[in-house]
Image (cartoon, rainbow, N blue to C red):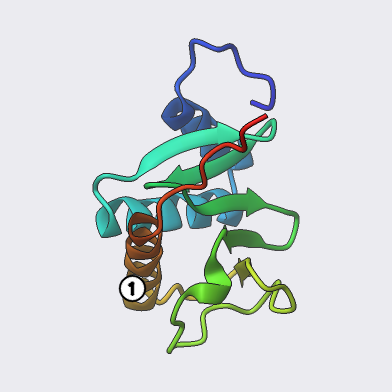
Amino acid sequence: MKDAPEDISPAQQIDGRIAALGDWRGETLARVRAIIRTADPEVVETWKWRGVPVWEHAGILCTGETYKAVVKLTFAKGAALPDPKGLFNSSLEGNTRRAIDIHEGEAIDEKALTALIQAAVALNAAKPARAAKKA
């Protein structure tokens, strides 16, 4: 799925990744995807960086990376988001991004993740995208 033909939509590429994983990581990615889509029905799914599912709304909300021992949701502007339930447990040292590492067997706090997604949408919508620098 890394170099999928251009006629395959990002949603189909994400479907393919979920199916190809065939284990708890695929199930977890499918679950967080469903939560994201429910939290923001206007979310746009994209496929970037040669194989990373990305969810966008007025900019990047988060990515869904899969590794051997973890499914990682990286929020592009996570440091600016309220996280009262403490979902962010990775990439905490930076000034911009924050991530949630989900390990096999861990429960997903759907309500808290929904709130993070909705806060990310609100943050993106509140701040206009940077204009390209003039030459």
| Image-quadrant location for residue 120 | bottom left
Q: Is residue 66 shown left or right of residue 108?
A: right
Percent position of residue 36, x then y: 36, 55
Q: Residue at x 43, y 38 (%)?
A: 45
Percent position of residue 33, x then y: 41, 51
Q: Residue at x 68, y 74 (%)?
A: 90
Q: Residue at x 60, y 60 (%)?
A: 74
- 40 above or below 132? below
Residue 105 visible in this rendered orientation of the protein = yes
Percent position of residue 104, x then y: 62, 67
Residue occupied by mark 1? 115
- 40 above or below 11? below
> SS class of the residue under badge 1?
helix
- 16 above or below 94? above
Q: Quadrant of the N terminus?
A: top right
- 21 above or below 85? above
Tell me the kind of residue under disc 1: Ala
Q: Is residue 5 shown left or right of residue 123?
A: right
Percent position of residue 39, x then y: 28, 59
Residues 129 and 66: in front is 129
Residues 25 and 76: in front is 76
Characterize the local packing of mark 1: few (<14), some (14-19) or many (20 or more) Cα atoms within 10 angstroms: some
Residue 102 visible in this rendered orientation of the protein = no
